[in-house]
Image: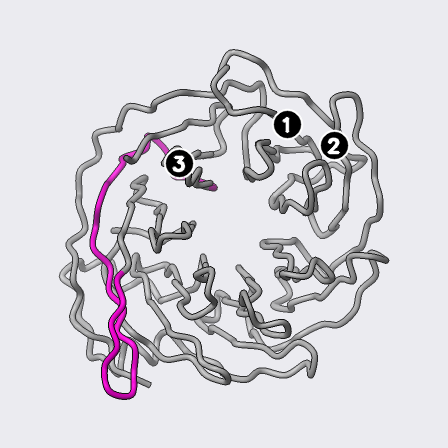
Amino acid sequence: MAACPPFSSKVNASHNPSLATSELKTDYPIVCICHSYDSLVAGSDEGRVLLWTGPLTDTKSPPQHFQLDMQDSVNVICPRSSDTWLVGCGKHLVQVQLNSASLTLHWSVECGDEINSVDINDKQTYCAVADDTGSVSLIDLKSGKMHKKLSGHDNICQCVKFRPKSPWCLLSGGLDCMLFLWDFKKGQALASVNMADELRKGEVESENSSYVVNPPLIHSLCITADGLIAAVGLENGKIMLFTIGGKGLKLASCFDAHSQGVSSLGLTNDLTLVSAGNDTRIVVWALSTARAPGKTLVWANELHSITHAEKPSGIQILNESKRIIVADETETVKIYDYS
């Protein structure tokens, strides 16, 4: 595994809130958000689901409210079609159909503990669920039944993503500082990387003293559309970029992105990476790649920085309009331009 190269960016310490382009007001704290199929769906406490439809230009229109028959917070929402969504509420994953009049429950499955992350594979045959037990559960989307469990993390599994263009591969990251590349057909790990070991190999010593006491727990994960690069957000404020091969992970670069944990990551189709941190900053990065003998080089350059008023709990990127939707567990969802 390649050593961690020198950091290529400085953390901006500014805390002056940026001006949002628009705001969506609600009556409930927003825990998570998901934008797809021209709809924005948000999760709140006590099983509440909120829905905005259309291009989000009429910010004064209130969202539609739906109530699950559950009292836990809705922590995760993942789209399956224009009106069908997967919702993680406590330790239950449900598939629901949302329309202008009602919420229809298709199926429900109970996972081992509180759900942290959900993703659907390219063929929409399976979804992967990361939960507090450290397991990754594979759910058959047609039947809504548990298909298989992957066990490898020694602590909470915080995030999971299927690898695009690779039918049986997915990545998972956890609070044990481990990143796994799985073949879920065989039910085995193809590769694993310990973030702490990678930092020690690179003999990295940050200029920010807070990193010394913050272990590199994995909080967030995203993968490029071609399935070749994974970005991993860590508790110590760093982002690590890995190249993904057939059966392996290679560290390409790492850099200081935030002064606190990287809570959310998102990617656009043009290799634009967006990170949100517990330091209230949201940063837009341009990823660049180049071939070198025996490896691929990847690096990031900061394009834009937004200072939010609170710690973001979730972000969504609107590619065409170059806007970022931000939730922060308050009753207001904010939208920023980054063009």
Q: Nearer the viewer, residue 244 or 90?
A: 244
Q: Are marks 2 and 1 in contact (CB under 8 Å)?
A: yes
Report the residue marked by disc 2: 98
Image vertical order of residue 155 relative to residue 221, above or below: below
Residue annotated with mark 1: 51
* Residue 45: in magenta span: no
Amino acid type of disc 3? Answer: Ile
Secondary structure of residue under mark 3:
strand
The C terminus is located in which quarter?
A: top left
Q: Amino acid at mark 1?
A: Leu
Q: Is residue 298 magenta?
A: yes
Q: Check disc 2 and give the amino acid type.
A: Leu
Q: Secondary structure at mark 2?
A: strand
Is 258 on the left-hand or right-hand side of 14? right
Sequence order check, earlier mark of 2 and 1: 1
Q: Is residue 54 above or below residue 259?
A: above
Residue 40 vertical placement versus 106 (above, below): above
Q: Is residue 141 left or right of residue 29?
A: right
For image coordinates 52% across by 25% down, the residue present is: 55
Q: Main secondary structure of the magenta part?
A: strand
Q: Which mark is residue 324?
A: 3
Circle 2 packing at 10 Å, graded few (<14), some (14-19), many (20+), is many
Q: Which residues are magenta?
A: 288-314
State which tag comes first along the sequence, 2 or 3.
2
Q: Position of residue 316 (x, y in %)?
A: 46, 40
Q: Tell me: residue 30, above or below residue 242.
A: above
**How much space separates mark 3 and mark 1, taking CA atoms?**
17 Å
Of the numbered discs 3 and 1, the one sitting upstream in the chain is 1
Q: Secondary structure at mark 1?
A: strand
Q: In the rendering, at what x and y percent does residue 14 appear?
A: 17, 38
Q: Is residue 89 visible to us here?
A: no
